[in-house]
Image (spheres, helix red, strand yellow):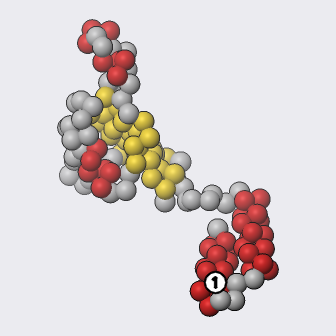
């Protein structure tokens, strides 16, 4: 995608200079098509963060966490063994976006809970 970025930056500069031409845009489109054909990701690599909390409140305490980045499951703890984030809101402040909220149907009966409970799934692009 570096070639696409370079082409788009060139187009933007030529636009500001008043010299943008159709050929400039055609080169940028060709670079984008080549990158897509080569299988290059358009927005970087997606990372996923799975977080289990004590409630549906984004400020609730975290009781479990796992990060999937670059095709591997990473422990989401620091050197001292503490979770990387104290709450969902802390993770959001670090660039994570919520893509799945807890399944509230799993919370209806404490004795019949078959899921992890209050699990959030977040993502960010690298």
Label 1 belongs to which residue? 15
- Tell me residue 122's x, y (percent): 41, 44
Query: Which residue is at a point 78% across and 78% down the rendered structure image?
Result: 22
Q: Is residue 36 left or right of residue 83?
A: right
- Farthest residue in the front direction? 18
Note whether residue 74 is visible.
no
Quadrant in which the N terminus is drawn: bottom right
Q: Position of residue 76 (x, y in %)?
A: 33, 47
Instruction: Say if 23 sits above or below 17 in the image.
Output: above
Where residue 5 appears, x then y in whole percent?
Answer: 62, 73
- Number of on-image labels: 1
Q: Quadrant of residue 63?
A: top left
Please tell me in which quadrant of the rendered image residue 8 appears: bottom right
Q: Quadrant of residue 109?
A: top left
Query: Where residue 115 appears, x then y in whole percent?
Result: 37, 20
Q: Which of the two residues, 75 or 58, is positioned nearer the viewer here?
A: 58
Image height of 108 relative to 94, above or below: above
Instruction: Please tell me whether mark 1 sits on a helix, a strand or a loop.
Output: helix
Image point (65%, 89%), residue name: 18
Q: Is residue 122 left or right of residue 72?
A: left
């Amino acid at each position: 995608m570096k070639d696409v970025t370079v082409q788009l930056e060139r187009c933007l500069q030529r636009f500001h200079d008043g010299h943008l031409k159709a050929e400039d845009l055609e080169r940028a489109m060709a670079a984008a098509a080549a990158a897509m054909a080569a299988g290059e990701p358009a927005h970087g690599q997606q990372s996923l963060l799975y977080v289990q909390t004590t409630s549906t409140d984004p400020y609730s305490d975290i009781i479990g966490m796992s990060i999937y980045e670059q095709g591997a499951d990473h422990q989401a703890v620091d050197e001292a063994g503490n979770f990387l984030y104290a709450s969902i809101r802390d993770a959001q402040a670090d660039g994570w976006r919520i893509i799945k909220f807890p399944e509230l149907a799993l919370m209806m009966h404490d004795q019949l809970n078959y899921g992890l409970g209050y699990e959030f799934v977040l993502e960010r692009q690298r």
